[in-house]
Image (tube, rainbow, N blue to C red):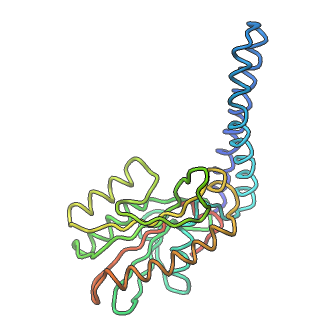
Amino acid sequence: MFLPNIEGLLEATIVLNTLYREIRHLLLLGKKTKSVVFLMQLQMFLPIIMRYAEAFFGAVDAFSGGKPIGDGVGALVAAKLMRGKPHKEIVEKVVASEFDFEGRRVVVIKAKGPGAEVGKPGEAIARIVAQNSGAVARIIMIDAAAKLEGEKTGRIAEGVGAAIGDPGPEKYKIEEIAVKYGIPIDAIAIKLSLEEAITVMRKEILEAAEKVVQRVLNIIKERVREGETVIVAGIGNTIGIGQ
């Protein structure tokens, strides 16, 4: 359980070390060449570099203490839905909980916590759909999403398609199985900044998770008929978030 936390801690410290070396590189290069251009570059980029540095310094605190981070909001929604219900590990590092909700069969998945895991949600969804021979009415996905400056932290956006930041195999597996069986995918995104994604979860994000739980239940009632099966996938790093 603690090994993934250590891996996350190492990743954050590596980024901090890289930022330090990049700043030192430009500073020494400017002095060595006696060129003010390098120092001007450093001055222009320094505000952004400092934002990244402060964010990853905050990530060190979160990962070393095993505290939930903003990126785990999708996993938190899933954990709230499966709270008090039996669960099992359906694929490596991904747990699933199955229960009945107003006559609908609901299968909720998330990365296995409370370690810093993201799991393989694409593989898990593909397996559940295959086990049900494609008889899945909908897939509902919840994940954090990057906000633009000026947008409110915790704002909830809805859309369609696979809500997952992974550009590779996991997203492909979800889209492949959904297209194969004609399963619609609902996406719910909770907006936050880079700093908020990798540091300890803020109150606004926690409150948004509560709202998303109710929205997911409403979607199930409105768009899934009685007797049908729906998959709810909470995406994100589940550090500090159990089942």
Farthest residue to the bottom: give it.
102
Quarter of the figure that contains the C terminus? bottom right
Farthest residue to the top: give it.
33
Give whichever of 150, 203 is nearer the camera: 150
The spot of residue 8 in percent (x, y) is 64, 51
Picture quadrant where residue 232 is located: bottom left
Quarter of the figure that contains the N terminus? bottom right
- Identified at 34% across, 77% down, the residue is 230
- Identified at 73% across, 7% down, the residue is 33
The spot of residue 24 in percent (x, y) is 75, 23
Vertical order, 73 against 164 (above or below): below
Q: Is residue 64 left or right of residue 120?
A: right
- Identified at 58% across, 77% down, the residue is 210
- Identified at 42% across, 83% down, the residue is 218
Farthest residue to the front: give it.
150
Vertical order, 189 against 165 (above or below): below
Q: Is residue 162 left or right of residue 71?
A: left
